[in-house]
Image: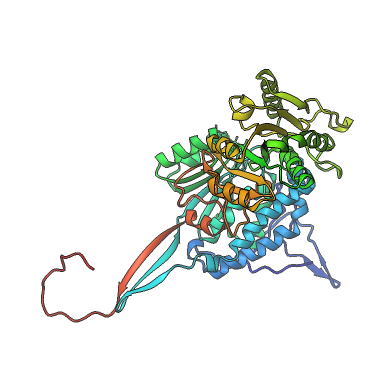
Amino acid sequence: AIRTFSTSIRYLQPVSPVNSLNIKRTTPLFINGEFVESKTDKWIPLYNPATNDLTWRKSSILSRQRILLDLQLLIREHTDKIAKAITEEQGKTFADAKGDVLRGRQVVETACGITNLLMGEKLTVATDMDTYTIREPLGVTAGICPFNFPAMIPLWMFPLSIAAGNTMILKPSERDPGAALILAQLAKEAGVPNGVLNIVHGSIDTVSFLCDNEHIKAISFVGSDRAGKYIYKRGTANGKRVQANLGAKNHGVVMPDANKNYTLNQLAGSAFGAAGQRCMALSTVVFVGEAKEWIPELVDRARKLKISGGMEPDADLGPLITRQAKERVENLIQSGVDQGAKLILDGRNPTVSEKYKGGNFVGPTILADVKPHMECYKEEIFGPVLVILNVDTLDDAVELINNNPYGNGTAIFTSNGSNARYFTTSIEVGQIGVNVPIPVPLPMFSFTGNKASIQGDISICKLDGKSGLQFYTQTKTVTALWRHEDVDHTKSAVTMPT
Ligand code: NAD
């Protein structure tokens, strides 16, 4: 079938080697009532002569909106292909990978509202005098991504940036760049002109280049503390706007009045789903008082989870990203044991089918009686390992969490509104779930990490959503007086205008 797009540039091109979608923007022959693909090996690039010279920032906001509308449709149509690339390169289950794509697509859908999101403000401040704001693009922006959400995190970055009229250079994780390449292909297909979205690969050298390049005005980073601190320091030293969203240690507080089955199901899912490789994984549970009696039932649930390759339909969790990641997680489990924690479920060397014998698997692991000084509590483990601490009161739980340097996400499980209200107002964490295990807010809000989980000017550092646009735009404020009295004197107006 032939699709029509509201593109500004149309292409006749051979299928690129990186195109795992087999999208052919070619013009077929029409023979005997059928569209037939040409067998030629010679292709002619075709441009719309009316728009060749249009720069992206001067394109109309409606034309950019149109392209985003097509992009969200293409992402929806190709969800399975993007998800398959994620499962093959990142390891998470296919169902989880589809969630990765969906949560990213929601940002594109939000960016489709760019016409409203970019509206400025206007006020008549005195007779005949108006003040209004204009939100302008910054120019060239960069996005540097981690491995754990190969579709969602690139989609946190480039749709809003380009919707605002910027161009973006995106560096996906070198461990799983496939999804970003498919997204770039789809962006092109939707009509994003050449040069507006660019993908570069590599590791520290590429990152350093992006931090130093004089044309780049702003960098969005999501990833580990080490890389983020480096990028923040180097990027800001070069005068760039930088937001660095870093590591996490997310606590879930369980009150004895919580609904037991619901809570335990949620805890096991959010601790071990995606093999714990989520910045919003619930990796630490704090049982308050009698709630600790439920620990054996939590272990039962964790033990039943199926460890397998991500494309297997019954897989609950897949492998870790690399052998080094597996070794690091195993070492942190051992450090917990060595420092006096109780290993009540050991997922090291799990049983997997023959086909996956060579994979980087660690099964669900639970360390109980953990204390705040232990390495397994202080480090972000980023694997399927849940550490358990016990406290006597909700106040103790709040104090424990507030003493932790990270502030990405937290959750409370309770049926008591007063407890929930107290928790949400006293906790120093950016994203809070009440009976929801560590929610990533939908993009009409934004991602709002706190404390050591973020570096950058907090007033503009927002990844997605309406406030995300603050990061990718510069506000101008215009005060205009079009009607004023004719004056016949020549005295300078030196006093402060009031
Ligand atoms: P990572 O920091 O190793 O890699 C992220 C990016 O930085 C990659 O593109 C990589 O090429 C680059 N990089 C790696 N090491 C670097 C260095 N020393 N100097 C400069 N650049 C470097 O992170 P990862 O392992 O891919 O991702 C996992 C981490 O990301 C976890 O800590 C997780 O909590 C964090 N994360 C945070 C959020 C959030 O919103 N706060 C979301 C997702 C993941």
Residue 31 percent coordinates (x, y): 83, 70
Give the residue at x 48% y 53%: 471
Q: Nearer the viewer, residue 412 or 395?
A: 395
Query: In which image quadrant can residue 63 be found?
Result: bottom right
Quadrant in which the N terminus is drawn? bottom right
Q: How many marks?
A: 0
- Percent of width and height locating residue 431: 59, 48
Q: Quadrant of the C terminus?
A: bottom left
> On the rendering, which quadrant does ligand 1 occupy?
top right
In this picture, residue 256 sits left or right of residue 462 = right
- Pinpoint residue 245: horizontal percent, then vertical percent: 54, 43
Q: Is residue 83 visible?
A: yes
Residue at the extreme top: 338
Question: Can residue 154 be seen in the rendering of this structure?
Answer: no
* Side (left or right) of 237 relative to 294: left
User: As rendered, which of 155 and 362 lies closer to the eye?
Assistant: 362
Q: Whole-percent x and y of residue 269?
A: 75, 43
491 to 418, vertically: above or below: below
